[in-house]
Amino acid sequence: MIAQGEVWLVGAGPGDPDLLTRKAEKLICSASVVFYDALVGPGVLDMVPPATRLVSVGKRAGRHSKDQRTIDALLVEAALAGERVVRLKGGDPSIFGRSQEELAACRAVGVPVHICPGVTAASAAVASLGASLTLRGLARRVTFVTAHLRKGAPPDLDWKALADPQASIAVYMGKQAAAAVSSGLLGAGLAGDTPVAMVENASLPTERLFRTRLDLLPIAARTALGDGPALLLIGEAVRLGTVPSATQGSDAVTQEKPISLSRANCV
Ligand code: SAH
């Protein structure tokens, strides 16, 4: 499926191997080398055949990782050496995945490069909530935004443009910036009781779901979230979904049972 000297950027989905596309699975099985991110689920890595070289180029905030240029160079070098290269990226490669750099590096030296899409974290998170990102008449727009802190500085976002009561906002890399996200959106006019869902480790057995409101988000994120990747979903659309099942510690945050885990029975 992969020619020698070719590179595929493959979406590995949010973690659950069952959320991998069939195409991604075929590509993984036909690679001679797989470079993967820290957010690629362990169950997905288990699909890599034992004879295939598996190389971690993991990137997690605050932890040692290869820089982007090194990753670009590794992909190109492997392809030029005649390998069949899969670059596994968490979620969908086109969403906060630095795929443009990798595409450009390959194209610059004439290495053929292709993309296999994946299920992005926002889709997995809202599925676990049992909700929808869009709602007829209520949520007409979905915004995917990253609130990654650069050297600790608050995210430089256009809060006025984001604070649309008829939009759902999916905040990637927003855990550390939860307080800035809350004050930015409140300052730009979103209501304090705007519903917020926080989904950690979406689609994995360690998944945890929390509900809070925009004005309580800073304390909720600080007290409820752990080490795993987490997505913040903000907007009226996430008010719907499962009924809260248990309260956790404070009034600021409510924990829920994920919907997605019960789906494991339907083979
Ligand atoms: N390309 C990825 C996003 C990479 S940015 C995608 O399409 O999903 C990394 C951020 O994605 C994390 O900081 C977190 O906000 C989110 N994320 C990735 N996997 C996640 C998961 N399983 N659960 C919750 N959030 C996740």
Image (cartoon, helix red, strand yellow):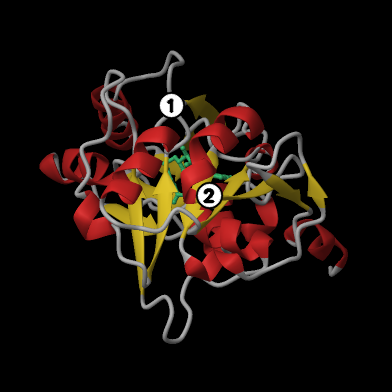
Q: Is residue 151 left or right of residue 10?
A: left
Q: Comparing marks 1 and 2, which lies closer to the viewer?
A: 1
Disc 2 residue type (three-letter): Ala
Disc 1 residue type (three-letter): Lys
Q: Position of residue 10 (x, y in %)?
A: 44, 51
Closest to the observer, 68 or 85 = 68
Q: How many marks?
A: 2
Snapshot quadrant of residue 244: bottom right
Snapshot quadrant of residue 106: top left
The residue identified by callout 1 is 59
123, above or below 57, in the image? below
Q: Residue furthest bottom?
A: 136
Closest to the observer, 25 or 194 = 194
74, above or below 231, in the image? above
Q: Residue furthest top?
A: 64
Q: Residue furthest right?
A: 265
Q: Quadrant of the C terminus?
A: bottom right
Q: Is residue 190 left or right of residue 254?
A: left
Instruction: Point out which mark residue 4 bears.
Output: none
Q: Residue at x 27, y 18 (%)?
A: 151
Q: Residue at x 38, y 49 (%)?
A: 9
The residue identified by callout 2 is 12
Secondary structure of the residue carrying tag 1 is: loop
N-terminal label among 1 and 2: 2
Local packing at callout 2 (Cα closer than 10 Å; few below 14, some 14-19, many 20+) is many
Q: Position of residue 47 (x, y in %)?
A: 67, 45
Q: Position of residue 112 (x, y in %)?
A: 25, 51
